[in-house]
Amino acid sequence: MSICDWPVAERPREKMLQRGAVALSDAELLAIFLRTGIAGKSAVDLARDLLLEFGGLRWILEADREDFCRGRGLGDAKFCQLQAVLEMGRRHLSESLDTGSVLDNPDIVRRYLSSQLRHRQQEVFAALFLDSQNRLLRYEELFFGSVASASVYPREVVKKALALNAAALILCHNHPSGIAEPSSADERITKKLVAALDLVDIRVLDHMVVGDAEVVSFAERGLL
């Protein structure tokens, strides 16, 4: 049966308009993105198949081009469309941080950092560079490593902060393992960075570790 033949209240698009996107299942959201099904399957049926095939919505969203295009009903056009949607989401979060003090938006900071780093397959060390009012100057990825670690050089962080005339930083990195718990190595490099930046009167406000399900804050843990 075509979705057009379903009761109006059960059609994903109409359901979203009436109740909002939060009321939709993963399959219904994906069906709206797909727009059409394939022979013998509605868009919702196809979406359910893809969720099973990939292992969940996250893995569809984070699939590389080759893996994504293997899915039935998918291809380069859908891949480009999805990447555009994801990038718009990241830029929306970035613009939300631009509106005032970063410290006034801790949830948006977490969501933004998660959107940038959660899906990365290697460890990435980055920073939010802030002005004297704690407003965002720039997000920049500084060091890249293996699945397990990235080498971080305090001197390079200081150079970048001075070049941007930053007054404060929020450090961040991901754990590709998905476990956000800070390691002893994370604590050691944070202390080195705090000491190096303190010499040039630049504050480290926090160090956030991005995992699959959470973002752990050093400041909230009392580790700074």
Image (cartoon, grey):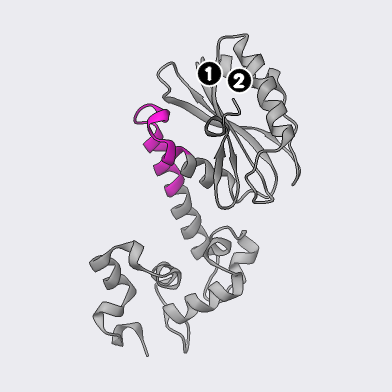
The residue wearing badge 2 is: 160
Residue 123, position in %: x, y? 69, 42
- Determine which quarter of the picture holds residue 10: bottom left
Q: Residues within 10 Å of mark 1 (few under 14, many from 20)?
A: some
Closer to the camera, 90 or 68? Answer: 90
Spatial separation of the CA atoms under disc 1 and disc 2 = 6 Å
Q: In this picture, is 96 found above or below 133?
A: below
Residue 26 lies left or right of residue 60; in this view the side is: left
The residue drawn where x is 54% and y is 72% is: 51
Residues at circles 1 and 2 in contact by the CB criterion of under 8 Å? yes
Q: In this picture, is 65 found above or below 210?
A: below
Q: Mark on residue 164?
A: 1
Q: State the quadrant of the N terminus.
A: bottom left
Q: State the quadrant of the C terminus.
A: top right
Q: In this picture, is 171 found above or below 209?
A: above
Numbered disc 2: secondary structure: helix
* Residue segment shown in magenta: 89-109
Residue 65 lies left or right of residue 57; in this view the side is: right
Give amino acid for label 2: Lys
Residue 39, position in %: x, y? 47, 87
Q: Is residue 37 visible?
A: no
The residue drawn where x is 54% and y is 61% is: 58
Q: In this picture, is 195 found above or below 65?
A: above
Closer to the camera, 211 or 181? Answer: 181
Numbered disc 1: secondary structure: loop
The residue drawn where x is 39% and y is 43% is: 92
